[in-house]
Image (cartoon, grey):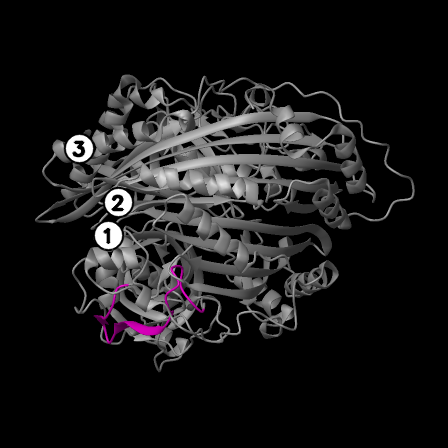
Amino acid sequence: MAQVDAALAEWVLDVARRNGATAAEVLCVSAESLAAGVRLGEVEKLKSSRERRLGIRVFVGQSSANASTAELERDGLEEFVAHTVGLARLTAADPSAGLPDAALHPKSFPELELADNDQGIVDADTALAIARRAERAALSADARIKNSEGAEFDSGRYYIMFANSQGFSGNYESTSFHLGVAPIAQGDNGAMQQGFWYTANRHFAKLEEAEAVGAMAAKRALRRLGSRKIKTTRVPIVFDPDMAASLLRALAGAASGPSLYKGASFLVGKLGERIASPLVTIHDDGIMVGALGSKPFDGEGLATNRKSLVEQGVLKTYLLDSYSARKLKLRPTGNAARSVGDSPSVSPTNLYLEPGRHSPQEIIGTVKQGLYVTELIGFGVNGVTGDYSRGAGGLWIENGELTYPVQEVTIAGNLKEMFQSIEMIGNDLHWRSAVVSPTLKIAEMMIAGA
Amino acid sequence: MANDLVRPEQFFLNRFGMNESGLERILGNALERKADYADLFFEYRSAEGLALEESMVNHTSKSVSHGVGVRVCAEDRTGYAYSDEVTFDRMRIAAEAARAIADSRAAPHPAVQVGGPVSRHQLYELESTPLEVPIEERAKLLREIDELARASDPRVRNVMASFAAERKIVMIVNSDGQVAADIQPLCRLNVTVIAEDDKGRQVGSYGGGGRVEWKYFVDQDRWKHYTREAVRQAIVNLDAVDAPAGEMVVVLGNGWPGILLHEAIGHGLEGDFNRKGVSAFSGRIGKSVASPLCTVIDDGTIPNRRGSLNVDDEGTPTSRTVLIEKGILRGYLQDRLNARLMKTAPTGNGRRESFAHAPMPRMTNTFMLAGESTPEEIIGSVKNGLYAVSFGGGQVDITNGKFVFSASEAYLIEDGKVTRPVKGATLIGNGPDVLTRVSMVGNDLALDSGIGTCGKDGQSVPVGVGLPTIRIDGITVGGTRA
């Protein structure tokens, strides 16, 4: 694929220097992808793309500016870099600004197998065939599956190069493959429910079978038919793995440096304190081989690593880039994320909650009356206070058994208390995305319904 | 350059060496197989952002992006390919990729003849965009916001302010020979305040903008209003008590709470979902879906609004579409593909995030017309309920109709009076049902201040909403207090 070479990056850094920049970084991303969709067995869409973007951050002393462009001709770039240096001169000097400590750049990179060397972009015919198989499996699963929003197979190949003016230079390639399917079930009363399921991996051969993905999507649609709204009540809540993962993402957001130094997090001042039940251990691992959240270096060229965010309920580290680390007088943690043309932000890499001993059935079996949550909608999580209130759906638990489906209710609480009151942790950790959790049981939350 | 901007259709011809015969050839390529329609979408976007935190304007950024997307439609199939290199070579490769969607044809498509530009509205003919205002002046305003916020209340701990401005030049050339082009300025000023007292820490935010000039923020001291509102909301929330849980009467304030319409109604009326029969509103045109007090409009033609466009991203002039008239479902929002398949006219709602995306039916500015009650009468009519005046985001499940939107400023109503502030809570309801419970509509329609962004299928576009004060006789409030 078309690659932006290291020589161009060196040249850009040199232009920045010649224009008066005291330090600079350059990030180039090239991407190619193909998405193929079918609906009700027929081809519905094909989308192919190629993109290259170049982003720079330049410093003039403690002042900095970011810029990105798709114009990679040297003539245009020269002016673009000069303009960005000019922009930096107009920006306030920030005592915490700057490149990371040069001594922290890694000398070598781990081999993470982020690119599938056997399979590049999947051609349209193959991609359509896979999507068709998944959708057919969903449509043939049950007579009540009557419609579909289709199935889509995406594949992409990415090349990332990052270099800075203190001698760091690194690059890597990655691939991704994704299959999603969304059948629609219709009940006797005409009410419809969609089910969605997917498989995603950096390696084509490791995707789940298309038929299995389709069958699971159908099952998820069917089990929502006949959903009821229940009475307002306070009961135990069991989060299925995907929904539990959303709690981890909220925690990671509150543990990230920029939220903390702004005072916009319920975890301000909680380092070393017990923030969760002693059952809870959460790892952030950026160097898992082949994983969706892995990378050989972070968005500032620092080494990614494996660490515990929470150990037996105690908050062991924050997630930091070098700017927020300086603000908080801590060391960066290799969690800088970067998109072309932006300052570093912070994100977890592969974040997971260590699985426990109980099967999901055992956990559900301990609940006399409660809700097994399989869907959440909306944005009702306040990272500043931890207040939590989201639309929810799932299955009602009665005497330890899953019974009828529930919809149009909310579950509410506060993340601080929710993490403290995790009572049971499942043994069902599956790497479906970069942030994963096993099934979790929370002692009690408020359900608002009828 | 100046002349290009007066006639945006000239911009791509001059800037990237495009010419009519070349465009006709690419469209011919796109139509080589048995396609009904093809179009080319050119985009050139420049954007700048400034941000202040801890009293320093320490973030500045600039981006330039451009590209071209080639779309081929055959029956209900869409092929799309794009490139960020605007050259005939790349466009030909994209056209070949996009046309793979169509079957091979026996007889060739008649040659495309590119005609003159189609007419467009003139909703944002600005003398200058904020991009032309010196950075120093923009930075100074952010510092003044910081000072004002900190001076407003000693409990203000941190202030974050940002100003983002962009200018997009777009051109659409389609296989009917139509050419549409537009220059689309857009900007937004945002203020977020963290306040703290011995009880805890709270956040408040406010902002606004649109397709406006820089002076919009200075006129009528709008920036001061944004700042004071952000401070006020953070301070109010310091005293907030737990929100109630369960179904109750809810009064929504005017303006931004119109996000209710966007989630509960608007998405469900987008043409693609209805053509496929996957919306909870499918097949309900002519049926009652709201109380007779409710008339809901989507209007892309309001001057200078964030959600307005002179032409949509398929080159169709935007319009005013009645979605619900006195409670009866009247219309869907259409792009060209879905309008053709549903045998109706496009409504100017075909929108896309950028050249990297195919268009789909999207909202513009969605609002409810004013009624006759005063806001005081509406609040006074409620014995026990919730008064919600500001919201964060919302979401909807199109197929089952369930939607949520999350209050960020709300109060209890007790015996017809607004009393204590309550913590944020998510409200959840059923789209086809919620407006049937509207029992009073205020005479105080307001549009939001210009902050909305809507996400659908991975694409974000700017939108507007509006609402008069309304009373809903029962909706579930997701608090923690039984």
Q: Which residue is mark 2?
A: B424
Q: Is residue A415 left or right of residue B263?
A: left
For badge 3, the amino acid type reads: Glu
Q: What secondary structure is marked by label 3?
A: helix
Q: Are marks 2 and 1 on the same chain?
A: no
For badge 2, the amino acid type reads: Gly
Q: Which residue is mark 3?
A: B147
Residue A229 lies in the magenta stretch: no
Q: Position of residue B178 (x, y in %)?
A: 72, 26
- Residue pictured at 43% horizontal, 38% vertical: A83
Residue A307 lies in the magenta stretch: yes
The mark that comes first in sequence, 2 or 3, is: 3
Q: Overall secondary structure of the magenta stretch? A: loop
Q: Nearer the viewer, mark 2 or mark 3?
A: 3
* In the image, residue A386 above or below residue B119: below
Instruction: Name the chain letter of the residue that bears numbered label 3.
Output: B
- Residue pictured at 60% horizontal, 59% vertical: A181
Q: Real-space Cα distance between discs 2 and 1?
A: 34 Å
Segment colored magenta: A296-318
Instruction: Name the chain letter of the residue that bears numbered label 1.
Output: A
Q: Real-space Cα distance between discs 2 and 3?
A: 27 Å
Q: Which residue is mark 1?
A: A96
Q: Are marks 2 and 3 on the same chain?
A: yes
